[in-house]
Amino acid sequence: MNAVPPCQTACDPAVKAAALDSVDDAITITTADGHIVYANDSWYRLTGFSLEQVLGVDCMTLVSPLTTSKDVAVIAETLRAGRAWHGEMWCLRASGEPYLARCTTSPVRGRDGRTTNLVTIQRDISAFRRAAEKQRAWEASFHALTDHLPIGIAVQRDGRFVYVNPSLVQSLGYTDQAELLTRPVLDLVVPDQRDAVAAALAAAGDGREPLSQEWRLVRVTGAVMLAEVSLIPSFFDGGPAVLGTVGDLTERRQLETRLLESDRMVAIGTLAAGIAHEINTPIQFVGDSAHFLGGALGDLIAMLGRYRAFAERVREGLPAEVAALKEGEAALDVPYIEESAPAAVTRVLDGVERVATIVRAMKEFGHPGGDAPTSTDLNRALEATLVVARNEIKYVADVEQDLGELPPVICRVNGLNQVFLNLLVNAAHAVGDVMKATGARGRITVRSRLEGDHVHISIADTGTGIPEAIRSRVFDPFFTTKEVGKGTGQGLAIARSIIVDKHGGRIHFDSELGKGTTFHVHLPVHGRAEPS
């Protein structure tokens, strides 16, 4: 009957004090004018003060000078208006060290509505602020460094960009970093390389060894950028991430291609000119001898006729001598010589002419002045290249020429000869692969037409065709599907550079697996328009 009701127990001052002391946040209670009348254990632990040191003390004396008088005035005005104040305040520990606290101060009103006390709840956020300031300082240093680096820098998390520096933005052809932020990294990778890139990002994210790879990235224009990418696991903006350096290799590869192209042209020109010289000298002897032999045989045959006439006239008077002459004729088979010698001479002269044609073709193909834009008969250039490539083609394919009437074209014939040779050799190799499997000879068709103000040249083969998966890489530098020693992967990259960069033309192809490939070259008749 005399048990204390639960509500009275709950309101016992000792219970209230125990409850407040169990709270992790620091709590103080002051009078309406700010003098401390109570502080819980968490506040004492936070500040290092004792009850005797602070009881009755004006709480504003425990505010650090880092809290400005303007801020203090705002707090006082808010509380005078009877409203609770929420914010951050710099306070002092017993040692004099400042700490930053997130505070809520609420007025306590009596029955008459007037403020009797102020209750303040504090939480020390100094460590968080220091961490945030360190993070901001680190980010400021990171941006100060990476924003001015000439190499591209990107940070990705969960497959999306969280930072890109201006160099990478510029390399990819964009105008603002915001265009790439939060965008999936794989969006910028050519389709056939996305699986490999995703695996590399996952490996770097798992903290494995730093990776260096060559990626083919897609610029905003759709052009492919060859990039050297190095990935390392990192920490960025409060979480794990993968940092990558992205070096643009496109210009370097183009320079390498141009140097290789120059070396190839020098080698081809030197080879062609050297072989032409070596062939030309003995062929002159053969030709001169054949001409002499032809004339001598004609004279000999004429002399034989005169001998026969003489023999008829003297047969009755010199029968024994005439009989001996006839026996000599029969032994020499003079009629056979009379019949066969002219044909043999004709064949020799025809062979000489064919060799001379090869010599002329090689001289034209390797002409040292061919890199300067000149007015050129492209049909003749195609025919000369076919002669040079004959040894690659003749064992595997028949050649069909369908050359239309073309006007003179302003071009760098030396470079175009190299393009045509490369396409013809590639066609021969593709047809040869089919011949190995089936034993059937293939066909290579060379066609030329005038289409408006452009010349369209196509080289078609009945070879293996190009697989769909690698068609986007055919013109990439150093990409090849040929066996080691048979191809460097530079031929079509050089061809594209010569056609597109030097002539302002186009090169593309159609292909069907098992049926063959046709390469198309489009060249402006009047040459590439120079920028004004």
Image (cartoon, grey):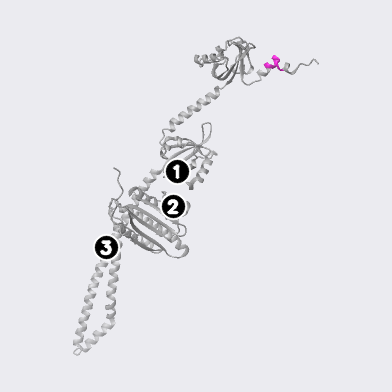
Q: Tell me the SS state at disc 1.
A: strand
Kind of residue at badge 1:
Leu
Q: Quadrant of residue 53?
A: top right
Kind of residue at badge 3:
Thr
Mark toward the viewer: 2 or 1: 1
Residue pushed farthest right?
1
Q: Tell me the SS state at disc 2.
A: loop
Position of residue 161 in the picture relative to residue 45 (left or right): left
Residues drawn in magenta: 10-17
Residue pushed farthest bottom?
316
Quick one: label 2 or label 3, which is nearer the N terminus?
3
Quick one: label 2 or label 1, which is nearer the N terminus?
1
Mark toward the viewer: 1 or 3: 1
- Disc 2 to disc 3, C-alpha distance: 39 Å
Dot 3 alpha-carbon crowd within 10 angstroms: few under 14, some 14 to 19, many 20 or more: few
Number of marks drawn: 3
Task: Report which residue position mark 3 lands on.
Answer: 281
Q: Quadrant of residue 249?
A: top left
Residue depicted at x 68% and y 16%: 16
Residue 13 position in % (x across, y down): 69, 14
Residue depicted at x 52% and y 26%: 132
Mark toward the viewer: 2 or 3: 2
Residue 206 position in % (x across, y down): 55, 39
Kind of residue at badge 2:
Thr
Residue 194 position in % (x across, y down): 50, 45
Chief SS of the magenta region: helix
Task: Report which residue position mark 1 lands on.
Answer: 217
Residue depicted at x 47% and y 57%: 513
Quick one: label 1 or label 3, which is nearer the N terminus?
1
In this rendering, does residue 280 appear at all? yes
Q: Tell me the SS state at disc 3.
A: helix
Task: Report which residue position mark 2 lands on.
Answer: 480
